Image (cartoon, rainbow, N blue to C red):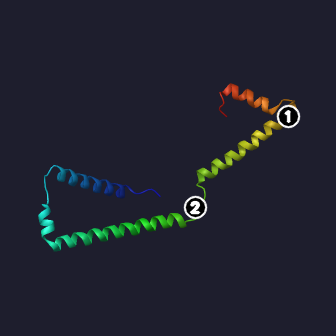
Amino acid sequence: MRPSRLVILLWVLLIVVLLVVEVAEITHVFTLPIQSAIGDPLAFVFALVFTTILALVGAIFIGIYVTQRIMSPSGFTPFEEEMLKMRQEISTVRESVDRIEARLGRDPAETTAEADRRTGGRT
């Protein structure tokens, strides 16, 4: 499932806002003196509780995602299934070629060595 353009735009906007805030903090465009944060116990407790709640919500979402990925019966993707079929078909074709070479009186190992010499070892 591909995210919509609106969701992508909102994430990009959020990242840009966070980058602007970080640059403003580094360049001292605005700063919050540490004394005011520690001096006001109510603000400190509020910030601590708010951060804890956000961390718990994030951990819950990550846990839900990981659990869903572990518990979902995920087999091979369609691409992987196609590659496995193709591998089986190549094995079948190789066996058929070996049988034809055996009927013609050629040694399949010798023919394989000749093909490797021509292709530089690529199969």
Would you name the residue on which mark 1 appears? 102
Instruction: State which tag comes first along the sequence, 1 or 2.
Output: 2
Would you name the residue on which mark 2 appears? 74
| Residue type at tag 1 | Ala
- How many marks overall? 2
**Relative vertical location of residue 68 with respect to residue 110 in this rendering, above or below:** below
| In the displayed structure image, the side of residue 75 where residue 50 appears, left or right | left
Q: Position of residue 95 (x, y in %)?
A: 78, 41
Dot 2: within a 10 Å radius of its alpha carbon, few (fewer than 14), some, or many (20 or more) residues? Answer: few
Dot 1: within a 10 Å radius of its alpha carbon, few (fewer than 14), some, or many (20 or more) residues? Answer: few
Figure quadrant of residue 72: bottom right
Q: Disc 2 on helix, strand or loop? A: loop
Q: Disc 1 on helix, strand or loop? A: helix
Q: Residue at x 66, y 30 (%)?
A: 121
Q: Are marks 1 and 2 in contact (CB under 8 Å)?
A: no
Q: Residue at x 57, y 61 (%)?
A: 74
